[in-house]
Image (cartoon, helix red, strand yellow):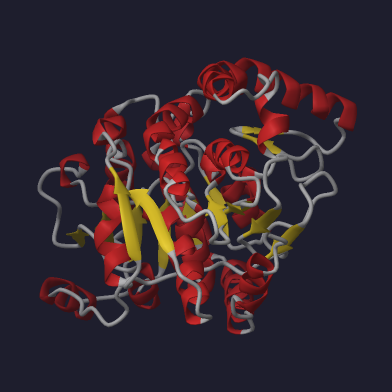
Amino acid sequence: MAIGSAGDLFPMLKIALALRTRGHRISFLAPEQHRPYVEQAGLAFHGVAVDEAVLDDPRLWHARHGFGVVWRATRGVAAALLPFVEALPVSEPCVLLVHPLALAEADLCRAARPDIRIAAAFLAPSNLPTVYDPLVMGPLTVPRWVPRAARRWLWRQLGQRLLDPVVLPGLNRARRLRGMPPLRNALGYLFQVADLSLALFPAWFGATQPDWPQPLLHAEFPLYDPDPAAPFSAELVAFLAAGEAPVVVTPGTGNRQAAAVFRAALEALVQQGRRAIFLTPFASQLPADLPASVLWQPYVPLRKLLPHCAAAIHHGGIGTTAELLRAGLPQIVIPFAHDQFDNGARVSALGVGAVLPASRLSTARLQHLLERVLSSRSSGVHARAIAHRFELQADLDSVCTALTRLPL
């Protein structure tokens, strides 16, 4: 089960296809808008309708309130898991590989069918809370000198104030209907549900922490291109041939509240005389009358586009971040909410880019960072060294083996 945007979908598709190659039957549950991707891959798809009005909710990209918006918006998708599983033949062994936002529903499935096993797919390090360094809690970076007791207190406060009021009321109602005891703590509960936790990022990007759930298996970034043979549009081919390598600007496929990013990026790039490609399916957030030095495209696979580019300005989603690391390009991360702050901090720590929180975005700051990143010899050296690690990546055999060996 995948929940969220294309960045959440593609890693699960990559694993699903690897499992199918091994002869396993795959059923894929996801938001209905992902049907073309899943059916194109030849997998049995079970779509769930999602109200896309949530994309216009101004709290969606708020550092504090974003989780609540996402949780409420995804309950309909996650709720589809239980009736689907209940309809499966009881005699058929079944493993659920789910996004962390569906762990509570997966646990309800296991209550109905105790033989079911659950694996959680954690796409980014910040999906797994820890009291160890590096500790980034939204826009707050906790200094290394803060003792662990204080860090545990911070997590308790975060859970009690932001998570429990959102998660527990609906979850406890569902548990009560099935004769299950109520929960008092959402954070502690959710990370004890899975029989196996998959960290779908390499240890060099986010090393295993002592307080992460076990058993846990690290994988490489399971990057997926839905149509690697798709040709560029004629206008993109002409644009790339007409001048120097451009800077890619993208706030992600699900963000239609990024007008300020495109506005600041346009001003900064024009002042520096740089060319750019603006990527977004939502053209309404673009500045009017883009100059000839800037091309808008609704979607281009990053894996194919990035080798033609000089750098990227993006939101810090884990899929975009990983694609840029693979391409060996310097990057500027403009985090809004969710895992983006932590991903940006890791990009900075790797020496391949810089971070400018959306709340501090200005043309002058962005222009300064862009000049620094593009002129830095060390950024290029570090970026190429990171890209070389992708050439050495293993396949998904260890992930598939771990999933198929879960005791049933």
Direction from residue 41 to residue 26 in the image, left or right = right
**Is residue 223 visible to us here?**
no
Residue 393, given in percent of the width and then of the height, sits at: 62, 79
Residue drawn where x is 63% and y is 15% of the image: 161
Between 405 and 352, the one lying in front of the other is 405
- Residue 143 visible to the viewer: yes
- Compared with 72, 108 (above or below) is below
Q: Residue furthest front?
A: 91
Q: Is residue 320 left or right of residue 347?
A: left
- In the rendered image, which quarter is residue 237 located in? bottom left
Above or below: residue 389 compared with residue 289: below
- Give the x, y percent position of residue 42: 31, 73
Q: Position of residue 272 (x, y in %)?
A: 33, 57
Tell me where residue 174 appears, x and y as whole percent.
52, 24
> On the picture, is 39 further left or further right than 156?
left
Give the residue at x 53% y 80%.
22
Q: Residue at x 27, y 57 (%)?
A: 35
| Label total for image | 0
Depth check: 97 or 295 in front?
97
User: On the rendered image, what quadrant is the C terminus found in?
Assistant: bottom right
Question: In this rendering, is residue 300 above or below 105?
Answer: below
